[in-house]
Every structure is written in structure tokens, then in C-alpha cells.
Image: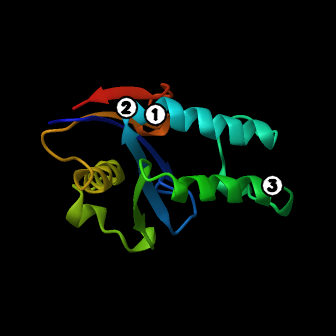
Amino acid sequence: MSETFNIYCDESCHLENDKQTIMVIGGIWSSTEKVKDISRQIRAIKSKHNARGELKWGKVSNSRMDFYLKLVDYFFQTSSLNFRCLVVDDKSKLNHNYFNQGSHDSFYYKMYFYMLRNILKKPNHYNIYLDKSFLCGGMEKKRFAT
């Protein structure tokens, strides 16, 4: 029997000339049956800690530590919530001319493929939500059904 899953993807330091050596592409996913409950629980944690908007892990401070620890605890306590990421530890070593037809964008799309391919399993169905930066046009998150 097949299930349907939502995969929410994001990336960090993915631009070619952003002066960052590390790049991360990741996704969290859950069955569509569980998404509303997970979202409700995360909103409750955010509300309790007066947090608004998108979560930015690079902005963790001592004053927000309890909030972020509660989120991490929730994640590890929730067996229906999954995570996978791909880490490029030194972008300066990339040879786009040899491996990526001279294009950082080709590399970027390949990394998304490698990150997602181990999540996708037949006969399941997936709604994949990519970050707006993936879409290169300033568009908001877009839904891709597979």
C-alpha cells in the first residue's frame, strides 16, 4: 500500500560566490497524515517561546537556546518526522568545468537529486516543497508532485 509524504527542502550557503566554504542541502519529511499535527506542535512551541517567522539556526543565541532545544527535543521524540541532508565541506574544491558542464547551477541541481533519491521509495507518492532560492526567480515555495 502506498503512502503520500510531504518533503520540505532548504539549503544553506549554496551560492557559488558567497564566501562560505560549506554548503548544506536538506529536507524533512513526514506522511501527509501527520503534517497538520506536526505543524500544530511546532507552532505551539514557537508561540510558547514568542518566536515568529522562519526558523534561522544561524541566529541561535543564549537567550533563545531553550526554544531551539525544545525544537530539537520535539524532532527526536517524533518518530514520524524524518531528516536527511547532504553536506559539501569545501566548495572551493569543486571543478564545475569537469563535472558540471561548467555550471554551479548544474552542481546544485545534482546535489538536490542526490539528497532526495534516498528518500523516495516506490510505490509511495511525494509532494516536494523547494525553497524559493531553488526556483531562481524569487518565486515562493512551489509544490512538485511525484
Q: Is residue 125 left or right of residue 23?
A: left
Name the foreground residue: 20 vs 24.
24
Q: Which residue is mark 2?
A: 32
Name the foreground residue: 91 vs 130.
130
Q: Which residue is mark 1?
A: 35
Point 47% across, 62% down: residue: 23
Whole-angstrom CA distance, mark 3 to mark 2, is 30 Å
Amino acid type for the residue under numbered disc 2: Thr
Whole-angstrom CA distance, mark 1 to mark 3, is 25 Å
Q: Is residue 1 left or right of residue 28?
A: left
Give the position of the C terminus as an image quadrant. Answer: top left
The circle on residue 64 is 3
Whole-angstrom CA distance, mark 2 to mark 1, is 5 Å
> Does the CB distance between marks 1 and 3 fall below 8 Å?
no
Point 30% across, 29% down: residue: 144
Name the foreground residue: 125 vs 137.
125
Q: Secondary structure at mark 3?
A: helix
The answer to which quarter of the image holds residue 55 is: top right
> Does the CB distance between marks 2 and 1 fall below 8 Å?
yes
Point 32% across, 50% down: residue: 112
Check disc 1: other Cα within 10 Å, few if <14, some if 14-19, many if 20+. Answer: some
